Image (tube, coloured by chain):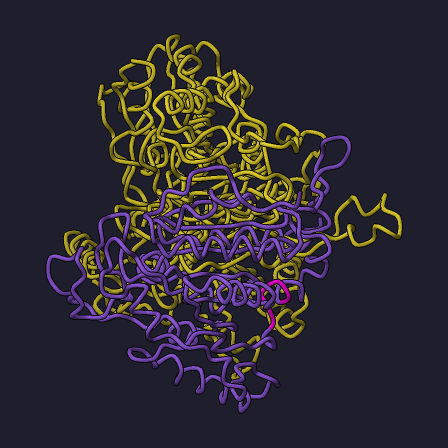
Amino acid sequence: MAHNFRTDLWVDWCPGCGDFGILAALQQTMIELNKKPEDFAIFSGIGCSAKTPHYINAPGMHTLHGRVIPFATGIKLANPNLTVIADGGDGDLLSIGAGHFVAAGRRNVDMTIIIHNNGVYGLTKGQASPTMPRGEKTKGLQRPNIMDSLNPVALALSVGYTFVARAFSFDVKNTKDIIMKAVKHRGTSIIDLLQPCPTYNDVNTKEWYEKRVYYLDKDPSWDPVVKEATSEAVEQKFIQAIQKSLEWGDRIPLGVIYQNDLVPSFDARIAEHIKNYLEVPPSESPIVNAEGQPIARMEKIFIDRLIRR
Amino acid sequence: MPMVDIDLIIGGPQGGGIDSAAQIVIRAFSIGGYEAYGIREYYSNIKGRHSYFHVRVKETAVRSLRYPVDLLVCLDSESPFVHMEDVTVKSTILYDEDLVNTKLEQVLTMEPETKKHVMDKLRAGGYETTIAGAVKYMKDKGAVPYPVSFRNLVVAALGPNKPPARYANTLGASLAMALVGLPAEFTMRGIESVFGKKKEVVEDNEMIVKAGYEFVKTHNHTMVKELPLRPAKDRYILTGNEAIGIGKVIGGLKLQTYYPITPAADESFFLEGHDYFETSAGEEMDKENDVLKHTGVVVVQAEDEIAAIAMAISGAMTGTRTSTGTSGPGFSLMAEALGYAGNNEIPVVVTLYQRGGPSTGLPTRNSQADLMFAINAGHGEFIKIVYSSGDVPEAIEDAVRVFNYAEKFQVPVVHILDKNLANSFFLVDEIDYSKIKIERWKVPQNTENFERFKFTDDGISPMGFFGKNIMWITGDEHSELGHITEDPETRDAMMTKRMKKAQTILREIPEKEQVELIGEPNADITLLSWGSNKGVITSVFEQLKAEGVKANLVYVKLMSPFPSDLVSKYLSKAKLIIDLESNYTAQLATLVKQNCGIDIENFILKYNGRHTTDDEVYEGIKRIIEKRDSRVVMVRGA
């Protein structure tokens, strides 16, 4: 029987949670990628979304609040052959981990980051996350939210992410398609994954979203992909993407918003000076000879510190 | 009889080439067959503030410095003022005679507090508050002024178009070496060795060397007596930062992450300069495996220290040797992730270079005040190894060792060092590779339902790797499979399994790697210390021995888990114990009390951020054994 990427744990999210759709889409993507489970590394931060790796039958790392990006980055640096997917909450990625979110855009490590965006901190009983608009009063809040929301898509674009998309977790098929594209993109992909929290967010509900979302790719003229590495070509797609990122309210676009495959990924940048980095990545690189002694020797490496008599 | 023992200070503005001067001096002496050792002291500043280099030269191994110095080389206006107390009878004060009328208040680089201290001292003695006054102050203590016009010498050597300030450092170094009697050819070679391929720089500086030596020849001075030449050998000149970098590379480091911070960043910066190289494995390789001949170290500048340790932790889970380097403020940020590594038994190495705290504290000065913090960093209870090194040869070997410990026991390791070690220069021989072993973890098994956290008698489970095993890791308490659990019995068993490693570690690490007893077995006095004070303590022992006082040092390297039995064994035989550390609260002594129940009553402590010197340690010991002082605070250093 083919590996179905499910573990036998009971999934302990609330009934109706948007995370179920994301999990299903992820597992479906992994099946269709036709790789061994060991070829994946699934990461998460802290919160409801962070339990995702435990429900996927592939190597998984449930990390610290806000730190999913650097953890996912470290594994990819050490073994660039792994397919790395990082699941973070909106608080995880855009509040406590916002610094990492910004840095990741500049690095372009080949991995996929999924923002489980539900506007609230569910596991601590519904506090406002950075994506909840000011003035919104969900049932978990004592009074309307006093802080402004940020725009994850515009933020991602402005810090250099080379693949930016949005999906809605109740459309599992479309979510799977978007995740598949994101995984196949060589560079950091970010997916703003809209996801209702049925327990604490009684404003942005499944029905609220369903009335508003539309698919960018239904419009045959929509093309988010940068075709040539000129500043004009990049600028044109970038401006178009920023404009799309500002659409929110009555109509919410879903799909790939920006994609630039022409920016070298971080592993390619490393391989420019560590020539065999991709053929012999750090995790596969020998460090010891048969006698248990090191194979790196001072006289071959640190000759600039040698004083000849 | 040892005969050459020269201590000198070269002081000048930060950014004025003091580092190059230091390198020239040490390299020149090395080429001349001498041993040398030095420390760099500097402000948290890029250009202008006073920095100095304190170096000592001997025929035999040298691992410490002393005051007063034999030669004070003043390359800036500040040096004569701030080093007034660092000279004595017959010390030579080399200074720029064009600056003698500079008033203390004109020295803008000096901090007002320091200025006031100097001002008070000069006024109290009835001296002018000028460089001339400071020189007179030193002269009255018996030191010998040696005025030189730096400008005139540089102009005479290179013509009027070269800026004299640029050559002050090499001129100062040349004059210094001429004055101590090192033949000019060695100074020349020192210069070539430092500037290497920069032909024009070498040529200019050779002119400067000539001018310096010529000046000393014609301006006779009592000190000048040519040093005897000695058989020299090839040596490496290494700072503590570089030694750690080298040890890590030899130990198989493949991923180093860091966020810039003094005094840790120099290590990563050094690694960036040596990140792709040929290995000795290449010699046996066939053509097909040619790609394996070379290897690299991926050095990543992270966005902060949290990211740095997070990357290193997850990287380690692929079977890669990973590490990060930081100092107090950055280490504070790493505390949560350290607990994560402890909970998940992940072999990651954190190199912690202590500097003056709390908070930003003294960013460029020495301290040993983070020992307790390193041991206790991270909430909850978990096992980590905290391991200390005190000099460059140790640092190289220990950097390999701590990787072995991390993997063998599957724990995070904090390799604790201090700024003095980071910024001191040592001359060392090529490593004896037969002494270096790389030990890795239990062979991983790839099975269905692989239990990464399997309960075992020694607390150590089969290691698993991302990319090879299906397994889960979580910061939560977990089952043997690595899934979240809050089941009380599993919690108890998992806590016990993890905590058991303390005994395993103390049992498996050889005693001599945990604690060293250095010196006489039956001693009159026993010092208890750690880290970079080792060199100065053992140096003072030689002095005490000459006076018939037998001393030894209980030198602790493994700080956590604490080797209580071993330390108790050594200390219980001691007649008089003196704890010596560079902190206020005597943290190692506190650890000993906590773990061994031994009350230490005598302390020699230092927390002004400056390096510890022979004279003050000697004086501290004397005050304790002769005057019955119990707490001596060392205050030397500008």
Does B333 appear in magenta?
no
Q: Quadrant of residue B317?
A: top right
Tell which chain the image draws in yellow: B
The answer to whether residue B545 is seen in the rendering is yes
Q: Colour of chain A?
A: purple
Q: Quadrant of residue B466?
A: top right
Q: Nearer the viewer, residue B614 or B522?
A: B522
Q: Nearer the viewer, residue A266 or A248?
A: A248
Q: Main secondary structure of the magenta part?
A: helix
Q: Which residues are magenta?
A: A264-268
Residue B491 in percent (x, y) is at 37, 25
Q: Horizontally, is B97 left or right of B480 in the view?
A: left
Q: Where's the N terminus of chain B, which quadrant?
A: top right
Residue positioned 67% across, 37% down in the render: B431
Q: Horizontally, is B22 left or right of A186 in the view?
A: left
In the image, residue B204 sits, relative to residue B507, either above or below, namely: below
Residue positioned 66% across, 46% down in the render: A2
In the image, residue B618 sits, relative to residue B204, either above or below, namely: above
Residue A26 in percent (x, y) is at 51, 56
Q: Quadrant of residue A225?
A: bottom right
